Amino acid sequence: MAALTLEAARLAGIKVGPTAVTVDARWLMAYAAGLGENDPRYYDTIASGGPMAHPLFSVCYEWPLALALRAKTMDEAVARRGVHAFHNLVVHRPPRSGEGLRASARVVGVQRVRAGTLVVIRFSTTDRTGVAVTTTDHGSIYRGVDLKGDEIAPSPAQPAAAGAPADSSRWQAPIEISLQLAHVYTECARIYNPIHTDAAVARAAGLAASSCTARRRWRSPFRGW
């Protein structure tokens, strides 16, 4: 069986977008529901601004860009070995129901790690006038995948949103993850990654089980807006 590899030269500077995205109330509500949120503000279509966006909602409109980057830089066998390693999100302001956004993505770092190859993608989303809405640095480790060529040093991360206290305390709470939650989340977020819900795909990537077969406790660092 041939070794799985990623080519640094193919990844360097690759980008997609900007892509037009429309945030609608149904999507905002479904995402919150998929996470089991019970704050009525997430479902208030009577409010002047519509339902409130969950702090992590940006992953929904970033996912298609991630798929587009994968299609440009790696084959399916490599892509299916990607595991989410870290997520650094800056919310400059919450996206709003009914507004049009412009989202783009580019590879900003690639390096060898013990488990394989780490690829860092920066997602940049603005409103129609070019004002920043969200910026995300997303790292995925491609397990058992070798890097061909020189590493790409990651570019500096985005600063924290204006007004965010530098010494703000972190809030944590345990959350039980039910057997079916990965499937509910997948459909409500409009994000399908088989490594989350398909045990065969997870096992092929070297994991004991997918999220749909593993019960775990997750600690959220988010308190809300």
Image (cartoon, helix red, strand yellow):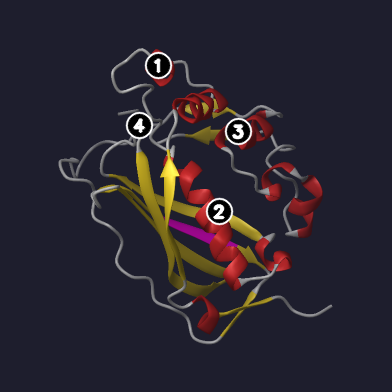
Q: Which image quadrant for residue 211?
A: top right
* Number of disc labels: 4
Could you say whether the residue bearing mark 1 is in a helix, strand or loop?
loop
Q: Which residues are magenta?
A: 137-141
Q: Alpha-carbon distance for marks 4 and 1?
A: 28 Å
Q: Secondary structure at mark 4?
A: loop
Estimate how packed mark 3 is, as few (under 14), some (14 to 19) or many (20 or more) residues with alpha carbons within 10 Å.
many
Which residue ends up furthest to the right in the rendered image?
1
The image position of residue 51, as x and y in percent, is 39, 22
From mark 4 to mark 2, how far is it between C-alphas?
A: 22 Å
Magenta stretch: helix, strand or loop mostly: strand
Q: Nearer the viewer, residue 3 or 192?
A: 192
Along the line of sight, the residue nearer the viewer: 28 or 148: 28
x, y percentage for residue 25? 44, 26
Q: CA distance from mark 4 to mark 3?
A: 23 Å
Q: Is residue 42 above or below residue 206?
A: above
Q: Which residue is mark 2?
A: 84
Q: Earlier in the sequence, mark 4 or mark 1?
A: 1
| Residue type at numbered disc 3 | Tyr
Q: Please identify the quadrant where the N terminus is shown.
A: bottom right
Q: Which mark is residue 19?
A: none
Q: Nearer the viewer, residue 48 or 121?
A: 48
Q: Residue at coordinates 38% horizontally, 33% vertically from top-left?
A: 222
Residue 205 percent location from the top left of the image:
73, 59
Task: State the residue position of label 1.
Answer: 45
Image point (48%, 34%), residue name: 219
Q: Nearer the N terminus, badge 1 or badge 3?
A: 1
Mark 2 residue type: His
